[in-house]
Amino acid sequence: MEDDTEEERRPAKPYLTRLRLALAPYTVHFNNPGYIKDETMRMLERDVVKKTLEETRRNFELREELGLADLFWDDLSGVLKAAIPSLERRSFAAPDPATPEYEGLSGPLIASYSPSLLRDLERLNQLVSIARNVLVYGEKVQNLSAERLFDKDIFALISVCVRVTARGYDGEAGTQDEDKWQSVINAYKKLLITCLQFYNNLIARNEQRKLMLWIELFDSHLDNELPNFADMKYKMDIFPRQEKEPQPKDEPATVVPHVSRGPDAFKIPQQPASSPFLLYIGEIGSEVKKFLTQHGEKAGANEIAAECRRRWQTMSEEDRNKWNMLYADVVARYRDEITQSSAYKKVLDQHAKNEESVQQLANSINQLQVEVDRMRSSIAATNGEEPAQAMADVKEAARPVLEHSILDPSINRSSPAGEIDFRVTYPPAFGAEILQSGKEDLLKRLEPDPDRPAELTSDVASPTSPPPEDDDADDDYDEAGDEGHGLLTDVPLILGPTEIEVLPMVIMAGIVEPTEGQPGYHSDSTVFSSIRSMHSVRCHLLLAQDNGRNLLRELLIFVAAWDLREEELYFKFMVKIMEAILANGLLPFAYHAFRESESKDIISPAQAVIMKLLTNIFRARQARTPSKVLMKSNPTPVDQGDAHMVNFLLTEFRRHIIPQTCALIFLQGQIRAGHAQPEDFPLNLWDMERMYEGVYQYLEFFAILTEHETWKSMLSNWEVANELVTLLKELDAAIPKGQMSIPPLTTAARQPTPAPSAETDGPQPVAVERPYDTSNPTAPEGYMPSPRPYIDEAQDEPSEFEWRNLKKLAVLVLSSLVWKNRQVQDQIRPLGGIEAVLNCCSYDEHNPYIREHAIMCLRFLMEGNKENQDHIRALERYEKEKSAGGSVDPPTPSASHNSSKPPVSVRVPDEVLDQQGYETYMDSKGQVMLRKREVKPPVVGNTGKGKAKLETRDPKDLEQLVQQVMRELPTRVQGVRHDAEKAAALAKLDREFDGAGKG
């Protein structure tokens, strides 16, 4: 009677009952294909599953009823457990000894099962979508789902999806089977996306679930000294219940993967009292399985666990003590190994290495969760819901979370940078010595020497480049979908930009702390400090293991592979992820971790994307700060972590980027001069493109830094102008500027330009030298060659790589750095930088409009600097006397750097020394602009230059100047069609010239 009364008191669950009526046949269908009629399956799908899915989108009561029911998660888990083997049988061919790699052809197999696979994948997608929607209810449902281990079944389903979709079609191409295979692959991708959405909802606003997911995903236990903590927590949750309670008949079979793991999986300090029993199972599990098999009994997970428990309970006290002692020895040995390992010693120096000990992360999990639970219970809404452990430890947890940990937020969010944080760690001479020694070594290798072994001259590389790759280097890479490679690592290789957005959302939820107004933010500083600590823990854990680093590398490369723009949602997500890594002081470690030692890349693709994201981050920051006028009087303080990051990148630029890049450019020059053969060049075109992208991103980042007074001062103190001038010299010496073919002039164009009158009432017209036609004022079409594509189709040799626009960008950075900066003005002169910039004042096919940028840079070099002005005038006199046939020595303002000065190959442009030409000024937005300087009407007969008093005109004159310059420079070539991309590029160049493109 009492049982009947209890049944009557239980609330009715119509939604749950209805759905379970479909889940049971689904399970039977996957276990026994064909047992359930197709008509029945279609009816259940139409009338039950689809209706339930639709209602979960808008019915709160339905989500509550399903989500809080153990039976819902257990039955759904049963369907997935039955479905996964069924999918594998139809998607993975059995090994075939006749094939070279002993693998069967999976493509034709999938095609043959395509009708049933498409139906079943859609059914599974609907069920996972229901589970995804139910999680929206909140924390109770999220925790119950994890307690019922449903998330582990989703892991297994994701693994199948990744392994299937990551492989290409291995059947005969161009057949109908390939189309069938592709349709199944698309269905797998759809299911994969839904599974990722499930995990996004599982961890939303749930710090504990986020942390456990992170440990499950990124705590790699295969190639790591540390144990798998997520696996340990799973075992500790399951086995104590087995000892105290009778074993249920329907015990889940999820123990199988963990039975034969051995003692290595249990070497974790401070285990509960049941841990010796776990060690016992790991040691004798195989023996028990053999015993059961020999006696003709079932040897499944339930039977093995039951037999182990029976033996443990009937064991004598003496034998049990032996296992306890063995467990203690295992723990002690593990502690000794971990403290003596090189990895652990690296962890102790966290600020120098930026690495984190996963052991410390595991020890902090309980403290973090207890603190969050305590704060939540003391402030708000979850009365009576906190765990018993949290209540027991509340006094102990009252102290700040991780107060002795290196993950303390006060360390991660560093204080404002001090003077010592901007110190120069490597002087300019350091990089110059590396480059010079590299050049000397290169020349020695290129010398013909009959006694020299052939291999010394056959593999020329940059001075500090990594050793060449072996032919079998690819054998070291994991196969797509390999578990040791990381569960989610191959997802960016499978999905497209619009499909993959949920994956960076999951990463963001774990490491990007919420800001005010966002879900998860808490106004109480103590509570939010705990939340921030957990985000920091997960950020460290992401980068502490190979699985996390592999996934982050693929996410970064995805930006470059799809050429995503800043307005793309995925790009914005990656910016947020990079900001979190930067805030935790881990960016130098991440950058270093993505260096590909087995590759010839000076800058790996992932590193280039990091630089691109950093440029975007700093540009956005500076857009939110006041204009330069205000910043100069009261500069915004910069974060200490940011200062260390910039210091690291400057060191990388000086020690590796410029020496190796310039050495390759030097080798290009040697090949063009005939001193080396094209076969001596160590890189191919694809390598050169990647290197070019990385160097270009570095220069763009420095261009943004020069717009902030603090960073500009740091760059000046580091004397980055040395590297920029060196790059200009090497490019000018090794890369030809191209030939310009000018069509025959028209009759009108052949007429000489009339000389201007000596007497004028107003200022002279703006003097703009046009290298394409100095005599034709109308500048007919056809004089301006079209900017060539990034890679010339006819260009087959990587040694002929043209480094398009790199020289111009270096001039732009130099211009911004030298503007109103006497320190840099004086640094450049003895380096031969003035001559290097002057050599840019001529036509360059690979750097459109570089002449205008170089003129602006020279103006900035001269502004307020008499020494530079005198030097440029001396160069002008030298060129005039040289062209007149006289013998004169070039000017030498500093004897210490004469050998490094390039010969001046062009005359000083009129715009540089023209006193009635241009002047610089700053507009209201803090942008450096160029405008025409007004002079008083000259007195007749007075030819003295610079004597008249200058008066400033209205800044609107700049507009007229730019319009005239752009009007007189032809914009297209006859017979050459411009596409939209080229037009946009030209428009961008125009904006950069007039100053609007900065920032």
Image: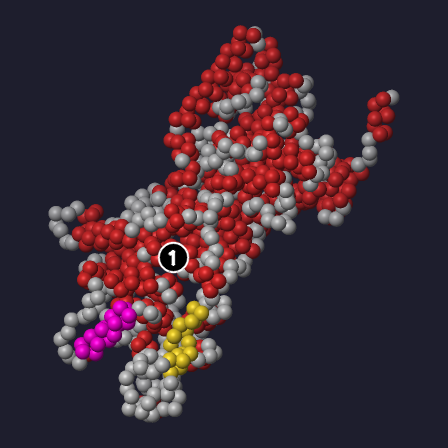
The answer to whether residue 427 is visible is yes
- x%, y% of residue 880? 21, 78
Where is residue 826, by image quadrant? bottom left
Asked if residue 647 is positioned above or below residue 6 in the image, the reply reads: below
- From the top left corner, tell me how far across and down residue 67 is, in percent: 71, 38
User: Compared with residue 310, is residue 583 higher up or lower down, i.e. above or below?
Assistant: below
Look at the image and tell me in which quarter the N terminus lies: top right
Q: Is there any visible trace of residue 657 in the rendered image?
A: no
Q: Which residue is mark 1?
A: 713
- The answer to whether residue 354 is left or right of residue 914 is right
Image coordinates of residue 851 in percent, x first then y, are 34, 72
Q: Please give left or right for residue 397 compared with residue 654 in the image.
A: right
Residue 530 picture quarter: top right
Magenta span: 866-882
Q: Is residue 870 magenta?
A: yes
Count the marks.
Answer: 1
- Mark 1 is surrounded, within 10 Å at the Cα level, by few (under 14), some (14 to 19) or many (20 or more) other residues, namely some
Q: Nearer the viewer, residue 390 or 228?
A: 390
Magenta highlight: main SS: helix
Mark 1 lies on a secondary structure that is helix
What's under tag 1, amino acid-wise? Ser
The reply to whether the magenta stretch includes residue 347 is no
Q: Position of residue 405 (x, y in %)?
A: 49, 33
Q: Which residue is more in the foreground, 470 or 692?
A: 692
Residue at (57% x, 28% y) in the render: 233
Residue 846 sits above or below residue 116 on the image: below
Relative depth, front residue between 532 and 99: 532
The residue at the point 76 percent across, 42 percent down is 62
Residue at 34% across / 42% down in the picture? Answer: 472
Color scheme of the displayed model: secondary structure
The residue drawn where x is 39% and y is 40% is 352
